[in-house]
Image (cartoon, grey):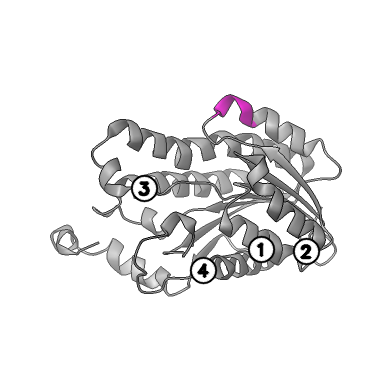
């Protein structure tokens, strides 16, 4: 359970090698978080980060998690919640960007990406929400993207998967209202990570630490939606309402 001043004491990171997920874990560890579970497709790849977090005085467990192995999600959630203490916060931080030109031409690859980014998140968030509802408290933090605000021709497969995830998370939060469980949607712009390596920076680009600080701030405020950086809220509002003939002319 969160402590007397609202600090997150236990954290589950789904996407245990995610740079944003790990940056958030480090950020929260500097506060009051003392138990972290890193759920990763390749647990061995998360051990270095786990050791770093242990060095900061945190109890860390690494467990296997495959976003597309849907039948394993409920048992994983049960295992984590049956550990010592409650889970105050679960961060849904996994996802793939993919080669956009390839995804636009290969239906199987496009389905793989959508299953990871959207279906996998739905599959694990439902049992997460149920376990948190049973314990009477908790926060689910969902990493969405500004790409989901309006599908763009340059990344419509990725954008559509994030649009679905964003809508799902908002609806889940509305359903859980009054239960003690809260859902926070995080909408970063371009983040400089391994996933975006080789791509050119765009205006308002940011890094994992900035996203982590925004998440930590959102948790303190009990926010429903977090934009990173904040000005993207206004940029995307303008793009969302731009007439389609004009929008199609943009090189985005």
Which of marks 1 and 2 precedes in the sequence?
Answer: 2
Where is residue 118 drawn, in percent x and y?
46, 40
Q: Residues within 10 Å of mark 2 (few under 14, many from 20)?
A: few
Q: Disc 1 marks which residue?
A: 219
Which of marks 2 and 4 precedes in the sequence?
Answer: 2
Question: Which range is magenta?
Answer: 69-73
Number of marks in picture: 4
Side (left or right) of 76 relative to 141: right
Asked whether the viewer can see residue 192, the reply is yes
Q: Disc 2 marks which residue?
A: 6
Which of marks 4 and 3 precedes in the sequence?
Answer: 3
Q: Disc 4 marks which residue?
A: 207
Check contact, mark 2 vs mark 1: CB within 8 A: yes
In this view, the residue in front, 67 or 32, is: 67
Residue at left offset 69%, top offset 32%: 76
Q: Nearer the viewer, mark 4 or mark 2?
A: 4
Residue 199 lies, with reference to residue 87, above or below; the image says below
Quadrant (top left, top right, bottom left, bottom right) of the C terminus: bottom left
Q: Is residue 72 magenta?
A: yes
Q: Secondary structure at mark 3?
A: helix
**Mark sitting on residue 158:** 3
Q: Nearer the viewer, mark 3 or mark 4?
A: 4
Side (left or right) of 41 relative to 25: left
Main SS type for the magenta part? helix
């Amino acid at each position: 359970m969160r402590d007397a001043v609202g600090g997150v004491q236990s954290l589950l990171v789904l996407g245990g090698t995610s740079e944003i997920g790990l940056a958030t874990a480090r950020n929260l560890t500097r506060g009051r978080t003392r138990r972290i579970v890193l759920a990763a497709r390749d647990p061995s790849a998360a051990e270095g980060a786990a050791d770093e977090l242990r060095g900061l005085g945190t109890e860390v467990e690494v467990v296997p998690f495959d976003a597309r192995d849907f039948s394993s999600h409920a048992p994983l959630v049960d295992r984590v919640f049956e550990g010592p203490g409650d889970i105050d916060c679960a961060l849904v931080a996994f996802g793939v960007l993919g080669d956009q030109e390839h995804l636009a031409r290969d239906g199987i690859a496009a389905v793989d990406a959508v299953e990871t980014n959207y279906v996998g998140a739905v599959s694990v968030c439902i049992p997460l929400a149920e376990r948190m509802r049973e314990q009477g408290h908790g926060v689910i933090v969902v990493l969405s993207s500004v790409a989901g605000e309006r599908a763009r021709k340059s990344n419509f497969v990725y954008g559509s998967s994030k649009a679905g995830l964003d809508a799902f998370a908002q609806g889940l939060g509305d359903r859980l209202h009054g239960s003690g469980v809260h859902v926070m949607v995080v909408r970063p712009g371009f983040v400089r990570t391994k996933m975006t390596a080789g791509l050119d920076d765009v205006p308002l680009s940011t890094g994992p630490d900035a996203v982590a600080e925004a998440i930590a701030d959102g948790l303190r405020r009990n926010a429903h939606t977090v934009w990173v950086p904040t000005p993207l809220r206004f940029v995307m509002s303008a793009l969302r309402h731009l007439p389609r003939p004009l929008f199609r002319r943009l090189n985005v």
